[in-house]
């Protein structure tokens, strides 16, 4: 039976029993601050289960998208090691809000398992909470499950929460009873194998029936509910594995196409043994990422966004073990969407976007991943050589701070080779870092003296109107791996106001120079590059300077988008929003601004939609010069980190935006194409950061 069929059969069965079919809620909880991610089918019914909300139905059934990668229910580290754990999974469930209780819940579950799915009864085992005699009696006397296949587990008083389910530290909870499937002797982990005794894959927990009887308050107290309820959950991936007679969720039709695509990409075959772990981790993680991003999460440095980043970086690291040095994860978004778009149509329209966000993050982490792995290897060598078992917190912190390795990634890698990480030391380093924290300023050393090649004024910028010009070299300096040139005039934009410097080329008689960066140094515009041909000292006469126009245009799109973004943020969040830093590059933009709390998914959605609406309006962009005083009078926005002269340049986007800016822009907003948010995060108290991209034409990024 295909997973799609199982899902449908389940929902239809309970509909038949008078349950309302309720669609899955997003994996990002809309109104529950106690959760980073939806972790169970019951989340959206929390208040109904507690009797605090009345609905026009008292029975419901759903198939819920869940993520368990943080908080009380966190399976992140198990993923890939077992055949059954996931960060993202689907939970089939039936719910009673003060309607039926244990007897019906058990009868329905048994009927569905044995009569609808026709699972062999002798392979089904039952667990109940240690003193839940009522549930025991229903299973044993009413249903007829023999005593030797019913196990009593858990003891909350002793801190053993086995068979006692709670959503989190607060909320609905109660004793539960599970249906397990015996996968057979050959899956056993040895003589101590057994339900509640080991963690192996032999007895597969399929379905959890929670008898919701209490509301747990923050101090841990359990208040009995006036009308007990039912909350059940069955992992679709697990029941699919059983129905498809495979021993691992990763062999079901929910995963096979993803793994097949990976086999293509990495040119290796998957095996279900330990060596297949990277495949399993990656296949799992790309599903979690796809669903989380599609539902509005964004990678960032804190909270939910950081969990996303951790999942992604973990997947990248495992990708390296399969030889993937280039971004690859984003190429798996396609198969995930193909498998899941039928039950979750919202994925379809987000396909390109999700792939792009993943690719951007992969590129960013990829830049430092190898160096980080090298540092890790060295740290391990030192630890092992000294006969120790703990990687110093300082090294884990360096991996985090310099190479972007989340702590649990380092812990994960350490555990794989039987080492630990000094967590206390790590947190100590983190504290010190915060104390030291000062924005590192870009520093360019002037290690070589200039050689004057011609006299006269220099560095006149003519690049607003010209992308190509005839120029004369005024001075030069050479280093081992680059050459710097100052010209009489230049079409090259020197890095300023967050906009990166231009690239391009200089050509003359027998001379060819590739310009790789342009920046200001004192009063000069410095063109840094590589001498490809010729001898500069002998250069006579003029050269032709040509900027990389495509790169300039891409940068201009991002720069104008940054202005629109600021204008929209001020509309959506308020006038307190002010730029406090930015980076405008050809492939992305980053905008730091004053604001005191994270943006909600709704706000992010509005910001993105509103920038796009202004792009579609194709508003003309104009520039003009005026006095600083006049600009202030006109209410132009200035970036308070910048120093301005008496005459200033203003960039105006219709009525939407007026900013002091020396950068290069598109002629009308329509040229930007499309605007997409990539991440939102906090960088220091009261300062948020948004990263975004613009898409000129729709990229084929799911490859
Ligand atoms: N809430 C319970 C669980 O997640 C049953 O749905 O296991």
Image (cartoon, grey):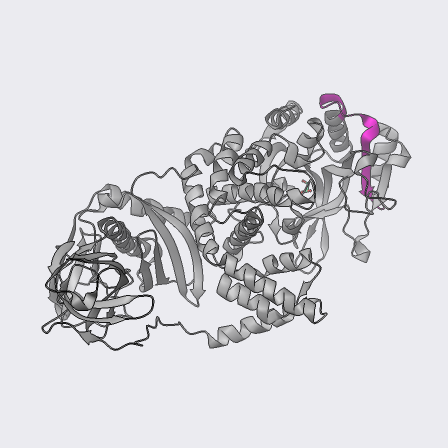
User: Which one is in front, 388 or 51?
Assistant: 388
Expressed as whole percent of the image width and height from the top left, the position of residue 582 reads: 32, 61
Please count the marks in the image: 0
User: Which one is in front, 115 or 388?
Assistant: 388
Q: Which region of the structure is painted magenta?
A: 114-130
Q: Is residue 434 above or below residue 279?
A: below
Residue 410 visible to the viewer: yes
Residue 53 visible to the viewer: no
User: Which one is in front, 432 or 63?
Assistant: 432
Q: Is residue 682 left or right of residue 219?
A: left
Quarter residue 138 falls in: top right
Expressed as whole percent of the image width and height from the top left, the position of residue 606 reads: 36, 47
Q: Is residue 659 left or right of residue 582?
A: left
Expressed as whole percent of the image width and height from the top left, the position of residue 303 reads: 53, 57
Q: Is residue 304 magenta?
A: no
Q: Is residue 567 left or right of residue 352?
A: left
Expressed as whole percent of the image width and height from the top left, the position of residue 597 reads: 44, 60
Quarter residue 384 falls in: bottom right
What residue sits 71% from the left and 44% below the top?
226
Q: Is residue 457 above or below residue 88?
A: below
The N terminus lies in which quarter of the figure? top right
The C terminus lies in which quarter of the figure? top left
Quadrant where ligand 1 appears? top right
Q: Is residue 126 magenta?
A: yes
């Amino acid at each position: 039976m295909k997973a799609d069929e199982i899902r449908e059969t389940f929902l239809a069965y309970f509909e038949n029993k008078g349950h309302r079919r309720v669609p899955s809620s997003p994996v990002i909880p809309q109104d529950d601050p106690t959760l980073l991610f939806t972790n169970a089918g019951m989340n959206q019914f929390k208040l109904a289960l507690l009797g605090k909300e009345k609905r026009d139905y008292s029975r419901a059934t759903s198939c819920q998208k869940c993520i368990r990668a943080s908080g009380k229910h966190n399976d992140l580290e198990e993923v890939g090691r077992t055949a059954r754990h996931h960060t993202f999974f689907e939970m089939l469930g039936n719910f009673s809000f003060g309607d039926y209780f244990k007897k019906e819940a058990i009868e329905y579950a048994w009927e569905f398992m044995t009569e609808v799915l026709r699972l062999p009864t002798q392979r089904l085992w039952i667990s109940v909470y240690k003193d839940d005699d009522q549930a025991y009696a229903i299973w044993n006397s009413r249903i007829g499950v023999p005593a030797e296949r019913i196990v009593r587990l858990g003891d909350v008083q002793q801190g053993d929460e086995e068979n006692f389910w709670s959503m989190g530290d607060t909320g609905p909870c109660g004793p539960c009873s599970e249906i397990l499937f015996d996968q057979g002797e050959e899956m056993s982990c040895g003589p101590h194998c057994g339900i509640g005794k080991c963690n192996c894959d032999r007895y597969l927990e399929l379905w959890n029936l929670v008898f919701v009887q209490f509301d747990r308050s923050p101090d841990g107290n359990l208040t009995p509910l006036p009308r007990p309820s039912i909350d059940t959950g069955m992992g679709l991936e697990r029941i699919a594995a059983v129905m498809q007679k495979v021993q691992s969720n990763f062999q079901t039709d929910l995963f096979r196409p993803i793994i097949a695509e990976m086999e293509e990409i990495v040119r290796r075959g998957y095996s279900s043994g330990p060596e297949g772990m990277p495949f399993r981790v990656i296949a799992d993680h790309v599903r979690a990422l796809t669903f989380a991003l599609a539902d509005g999460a964004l990678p960032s440095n804190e909270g939910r966004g950081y969990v996303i980043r951790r999942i992604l970086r973990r997947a990248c690291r495992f990708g390296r073990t399969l030889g993937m040095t280039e971004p690859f994860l984003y190429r798996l978004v396609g198969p995930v969407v193909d498998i899941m778009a039928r039950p979750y149509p919202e994925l379809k329209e987000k396909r390109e976007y999700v792939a792009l966000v993943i690719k951007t993050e992969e590129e960013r982490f990829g830049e430092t991943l190898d160096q980080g792995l090298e540092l890790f290897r060295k740290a391990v060598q030192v630890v092992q050589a000294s006969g120790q078992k703990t990687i110093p917190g300082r090294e884990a912190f360096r991996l985090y701070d310099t190479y972007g390795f989340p702590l649990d990634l380092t812990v994960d890698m350490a555990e794989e080779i039987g080492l630990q990480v000094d967590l206390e030391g790590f947190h100590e380093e983190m504290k010190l870092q915060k104390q030291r924290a000062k924005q590192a300023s870009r520093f360019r050393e002037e290690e070589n003296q200039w050689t004057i090649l011609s006299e006269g004024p220099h560095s006149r910028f003519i690049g607003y109107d010209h992308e190509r010009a005839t120029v004369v070299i005024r001075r030069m300096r050479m280093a081992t791996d680059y050459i710097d040139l100052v010209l009489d005039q230049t079409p090259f934009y020197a890095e300023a106001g967050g906009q990166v410097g231009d690239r391009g080329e200089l050509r003359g008689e027998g001379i060819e120079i590739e310009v790789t960066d342009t920046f200001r140094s004192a009063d000069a515009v410095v063109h840094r590059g590589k001498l490809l041909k010729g001898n500069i000292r002998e250069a006579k006469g003029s050269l032709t300077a040509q900027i990389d126009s495509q790169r300039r245009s891409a940068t201009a799109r991002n720069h104008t988008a940054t202005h629109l973004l600021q204008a929209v943020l001020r509309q959506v969040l308020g006038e307190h929003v002010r730029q406090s830093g930015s980076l405008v590059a050809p492939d992305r933009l980053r905008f730091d601004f004053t604001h005191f709390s994270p943006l909600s998914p709704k706000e992010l959605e509005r910001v993105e939609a509103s920038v796009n609406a202004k792009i579609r309006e194709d508003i003309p962009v104009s520039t003009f010069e005026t006095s600083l005083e006049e600009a202030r009078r006109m209410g132009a926005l200035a970036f308070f980190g910048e120093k301005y002269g008496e005459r200033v340049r203003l960039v105006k986007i219709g009525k939407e935006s007026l900013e002091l800016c020396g950068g290069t822009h598109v002629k009308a907003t329509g040229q930007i194409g499309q605007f997409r948010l990539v991440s939102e995060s906090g960088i220091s108290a009261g300062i948020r950061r948004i990263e975004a991209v613009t898409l000129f034409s729709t990229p084929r990024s799911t490859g």
